Amino acid sequence: MTTLTYNSLGEVPEGIREFAKEGEDGKFSVKIAAADKITEFRENNVLLSQQRDAMEANVARYEEVTGVKIAEIEGLDDFAKALTALRETEKKVKDGNLVEDTSLEEAAAKRVSDVTNGFKEQLAELARDRDSHRERANKADERADGMLVENAVRLAASDPDVAMLDKAVNLVLSEARALFRVEDAKLVPKSSDGTTLYGSNGVDAMTMKEWLLKQREANEFLFKGSKGGGAAGASDTIAGKISAADLAAMSPQQRINWARKNAA
């Protein structure tokens, strides 16, 4: 994974600005997965699928001619001609026109067996390569999805209605990653059976903010001082340090910075 560094938040491209994190040196950094690597993995999977389809077509042709099931064979047409000649010889032997000699047939059978075993090994090697590429691509996707969930949790946690302690964010990250899934670049909460969980309006999927507010109800000690259902009054202070109105006026990045500095 590559880390991009910028001198200010304004320099961060808008498309990845929400994932930027401010370092102790005041600079902003964004961790990104190499898109070309993921693309390479997926293209390799497509190529392997095409090769598999070509092999299956050749297998069907070989089985039609020989009646023997094998993965693939080089020079299939030449082999088909040789096998036809062998069958003609066998017919002449049965008709009594030739004395039967099985040495050629046995040699052909051995050749078929050797080629079959060779191509089975090639197919097995291709399958191993395919699985390896698929595993690496899946891991890259999982890391990218995990980063998206983490950034969404941290951003929602800094909302004045939520006011979660910065140190407490790590305690809910594991549960958040298990609940929220990335679908079309959007976070969608899903139950264990894959059912979408809806928010308070019963129409839209539950947001990260709504989920954290539910956590506040169950684990209030993870959050800063609040008033009632989670939002402090306009003139009240949160954790005795800043008013809710002032916090609401901050940008998302400013709220994150404030939460980090004032975590209890």
Image: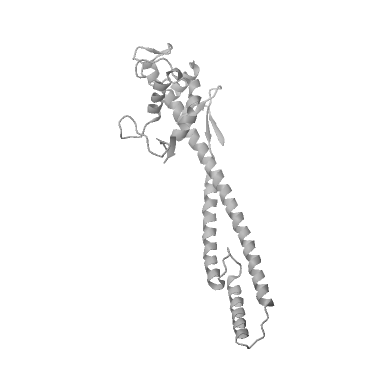
* Whole-percent x, y for residue 76 in the image: 58, 70
Q: Who's the residue at 56% across and 51% down the image?
A: 130
> Residue 179, how many percent across, how many down?
44, 33
Residue 17 seen from this side: no
76 relative position to 151: left or right: right
Q: Is residue 202 left or right of residue 165?
A: left
Residue at image position (59%, 79%) is 87
Q: Is residue 237 left or right of residue 103?
A: left
Q: How far across and down, in percent of the image, does residue 246 sit? A: 38, 16
Compared with 194, 116 (above or below) is below
Give the residue at the far right of this rendering: 103
Q: Quadrant of residue 245?
A: top left
Left or right, residue 262 beside residue 86: left
Label count reads 0
Residue placed most toward the observer, 69 or 182: 69
Report the residue at 65% width, 76% height from top: 105
Q: Looking at the picture, how far across and down is residue 193, in whole percent?
A: 41, 39
> Which quarter of the figure is the N terminus placed in?
top right
Asked which colour scheme the image uses, the reply is one colour
Residue at the far bottom: name it. Answer: 97
Using the image as rendered, state which of residue 206 and residue 106 is in the foreground: 106
**Towards the viewer: 19 or 230:** 230
The residue at the point 66 percent across, 66 percent down is 114
Would residue 108 be visible to someone looking at this image? yes
Q: Measured along the vertical axis of the image, is residue 83 above or below residue 148?
A: below
